[in-house]
Amino acid sequence: MSPDEPHYLLGHTESELRRLDIQGDLYRDITRGAFERAGIEAGMRVLDIGCGTGDVSLVAARLVGPDGYVLGIDRGEGALAVARAKALAADMPWAEFERHEVADFERTSSFDALVGRFVLMHQSDAAAVLAKAARSVRPGGVVVMIESYMELLRTGGHSHPHSPLYDRIVRFKSEVVSGAGADLHAGGRLRSTFGAAGLPSPECRLETRLEGGAASPYYAYVAESIRSMLPEAARTDVRGFTAADVPGLEDRLRSEVTAIDGVLVVWPAVIATVRL
């Protein structure tokens, strides 16, 4: 990997795997709704690229049922081990997981659907990765990509009333992600990415959640995100948070938001869907 090539900046530490689990909870309804609208249903074969700990794969697996099949691929063996354990616990043997580099994988016309969430933003050539992955989908199959649009929070309203601590967090996370070469505009670029990949123009929609109140899991998600980003922040000399800030960060953000009866905008996701 060259110094300028984007990479998955958060690694696959135990803390990061916990963060991915919370992320799965936060984005599960958005993901399921996207798959249902795309027509993913019982009996279909689905490829999930950059599957991580398997949340997206298992959403698809519940829709396709035992007569279907889901293959999740990822480069991180630790994440794949968690995904396999989840599939076993859910009694869904039709969801399988294999270690592959997303950019290298291809099984021509083997699947009815291609899905992925927050994976293209980490690719040095997102269109090339999408074009190759789409070759694994049969004619008439569907492609559903869900990508973060981080730039919307950095430049727009991310909380109401304004949360100074969340503002610091948004700016820090954005700077770290951008410094690692990932694309803060990945969601906003999805239409053009599909075009550059040689795919038909997709239907696109923007979705997110508003989180607040004392019981929201989002505070923990934010704290774990900062923890996972600290090594990359040190590598790229991004300042704003240190390891000493993390233990109390969840409680500080919760206290600030609940004191003003506020809401936080979760990182928006753009969903792009097309039938081949």
Image (cartoon, rainbow, N blue to C red):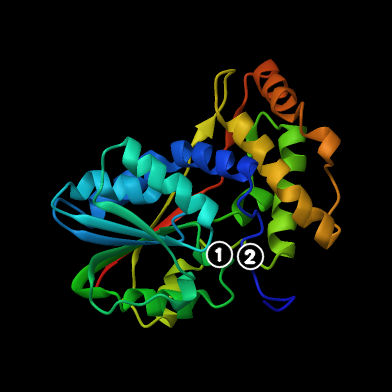
Q: Secondary structure at mark 1?
A: helix
The residue tagged 1 is 121
- Residue 238 percent across, percent down from the top left: 83, 55
Q: Secondary structure at mark 2?
A: loop
Q: Against 251, is 76 above or below?
A: below
Instruction: Give the mark count.
Output: 2
Q: CA distance from mark 2 to mark 1?
A: 5 Å
Residue at 46% in and 76% down = 129
**Image quadrant assignment for residue 90:** top left
- Residue 122 percent across, percent down from the top left: 58, 65
The one nearer the camera, 61 or 185, is 61
- Residue 88 percent across, percent down from the top left: 33, 41
Residue at 60% in and 36% down = 221
Side of 194 relative to 2 (left or right): left
Can residue 135 be seen here? The reply is: yes
Residue at 36% in and 39% down = 29
The one nearer the camera, 21 or 139, is 21
Side of 219 relative to 186 (left or right): right
Side of 134 relative to 218 (left or right): left
Mark 2 and mark 1 in contact? Answer it, CB < 8 Å.
Answer: yes
Can residue 148 be seen here? The reply is: no
Residue at 46% in and 41% down = 24
The residue tagged 2 is 182
Q: Against 191, is 171 above or below?
A: above
Quadrant in which the N terminus is drawn: bottom right
The one nearer the camera, 55 or 78, is 78
